[in-house]
Image (spheres, rainbow, N blue to C red):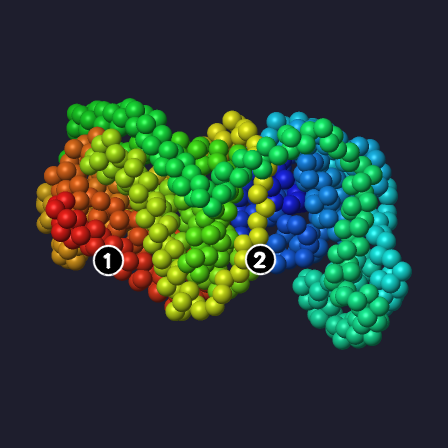
Amino acid sequence: MGYTVALTGNPNTGKTSLFNALTGSNQHVGNWPGVTVERKEGRFRMGDGEVKVVDLPGIYSLGAASLDEEIAADFLLRSRPDLAIVVADGSNLERSLYLAVQMLETGTPLVLALNMMDAAAEKGITIDVEKLSALLGIPVVPTVARRKEGIEDLKKRVLDELKNRTAPLNSFALPYGERLGPLFDEMEAFLTTKPELIPGLPARTAAVKFTEGDSVVLAAAESAGLLPALESILSGSGAAVESALGYDLQTAVIERRWGFVSGVTAEAVTRDLSLKTRLSLSDRIDRVVTSRTLGLPLFFLVTWAIFRLTYALGDPLVEIFGGLFESLGERSAGFLAAAGLSDAMVSFIQDGLIGGVGSVVVFFPHIFILFAFIAVLEDSGYMARGAFVMDRVMHLMGLHGKSFIPMLMGFGCNVPSMMATRILERPRDRMITLLILPFMSCSARLPVFVLFSGAFFGPHAGTAVFSLYILGIVVAVGAAKILGSTLFKGESSQLVMELPPYHIPSAGMVFRHAWERGFLFLQKAGTFILLSVVAVWALASLPWGVEYGSEESLVGSIGKVLAPLFQPAGFGFWQAAVALFFGFLAKEVVVGTFGALLGAGEAGLAAALPTLFTPLSAYAFLVMTLLYVPCVAAVAAFRRETGSWKWTFFMIAYTTLVGYGGAVLVYQGGRLLGLG
């Protein structure tokens, strides 16, 4: 028999690690129906039971503020999973229990996963698991997800609850006191005479959440035609309660919940005060990494070091990969020619498939190493500090500091970063962020940067790539300032974010994250990029009889039309124009196009490119690649997120103009400085 279990919890409680530990490799990623926020689903089996686990976006409560929180709350309230696992941070239990108490009120069967118990022990925190379970009336399982401790116990308790639960689902009743209690009694009595607002949601919980102004319950009440009657109760009895309390009902509800949570925590948690000096270690680190003077320079220094190390570790592997593809191309050509295949077929295999795709695939080591470093920053907790120190810069430019989180994701891929703008509550902040995300240098651009930097800047290649990433941020922030003061006037809201505790990254999680990104890169190279390179080869071979990759070919004709436009930027030759033209499909295709046109692998391209570019024009070309219109997948994601073709065409036009202007400025400015 199959069950559906929701995995929910606050951000930074180890929820993703727990999801991975529960489901292993048996998981997939999709989108929520009707929206583009990513959802993860996985499965695990134990005995004859199979459980589908739905990993929900991290939330602090069921009161939704942004779209990802709304999706999580809607799934928990409307979809009514068979059971929910609430992931709690054992080192900060009180904060996590607020969501657990809200979930108990909904009548959903719960299991509390008391995660990060190792961090709790380090802070001198001891939790009486049995007492906590008795106070809440639900199973509590201690876990350390990143070390996979307690996972089997958690699976067993989940299945036991699903199969053998005997306690009534609506047995939990939070004591709201002598003032709020009668108000909720009145609303509950009214609702029990009507059909359920939300199937499975207790009438009392519906009354409480209506009083809080919960959007899901308000919509259900309006749909059922009960909104006027409930509002009438609030304007009568509710107003009297507010008058007696001296403050609003929403605050009163929150206070009662926190009072209950504080009481439970006081009963179940003890702290060893002798570890006070150890508790300040994280604070002492944060005084340095988040300070006003050292925080930002340190963040840039760490980023620069990552790119230098990415090159130092990746270059030897790339040389090996490049040699293998070059040898494979030569051997394949010899074998196919000996087998009597036509010159066209030999060229297709050697130049199109092996030369084009191989010139992209060889950069897999750089992709893997870079994302391994990013995973280390994320898992250690330092990435959140990077967003925190950048918040000051973002506000100087009139942009929401929270926008830096999608911008950080943009270093991986612009598509999920655009989806991540759903965490922004205000449409103004969200629209500005969407319009500047294309300037974030996604991993698809990295093969282009690595190829050109290695060919033209030698030992300074890592610094050259680092400068491009910084340039993307600078242009994005500048664009945000202009957009915020012209098309989207208004004040940005403040950043409120939690800095997660520091952790020693798990080697398994780091490898898994790096492999997932690297595998997506290989998958893309074997499908979309392959088809694009084949299209380039075909256009370079037609019409039949012309020299392959010459100006007389179809691709040469396309390039000759576009090439004069790029003369002021220093790369006014048709091969560069064609590479940028096909780069709209996917940025990796820029390298694949050069590989197909020049009939060379990575090593051959590094030797061939200096015959076309100078170091100055090469850097101008990289600036153009960085800033001009993102790939077709990112454009499609932008269209889905905005729902507007007008803004989509605006984004295409203005990013291309910025990219072109930046390339011209770099080249012409460099010539004026005598760098040409």
**Would you place residue 333 above or below residue 240 in this image?**
above
Q: Whole-percent x and y of residue 443?
A: 37, 42
Residue at the (47%, 68%) spot, across then down = 490
Residue at the (30%, 28%) spot, across then down = 315
Name the element at disc 1. helix
Q: Give the residue number, with chain letter if any, for mark 2.
A: 67
Q: Whole-percent x and y of residue 669?
A: 18, 52
Q: Whole-percent x and y of residue 608?
A: 15, 36
Q: How many numbered discs sit on the rendered protein?
A: 2
Quadrant in which the N terminus appears:
top right
Left/right of residue 228 with respect to residue 419 in the rendered view? right
Q: Is residue 172 visible?
A: yes
- Residue neighbourhood size for the residue with mark 1, other residues' Cα within 10 Å, grouped as few (<14), some (14–19), many (≥20): some
Q: Quadrant of residue 120?
A: top right
Residue situated in front as seen by the camera: 321 or 163:
321
Q: Give the residue number, with chain letter if any, for mark 1.
A: 661
Q: Quadrant of residue 450?
A: top left
Q: Amino acid at mark 2?
A: Leu
Q: Whole-percent x and y of residue 178?
A: 89, 60
Residue situated in front as seen by the camera: 156 or 366:
366
Earlier along the polypeptide chain: callout 1 or callout 2?
2
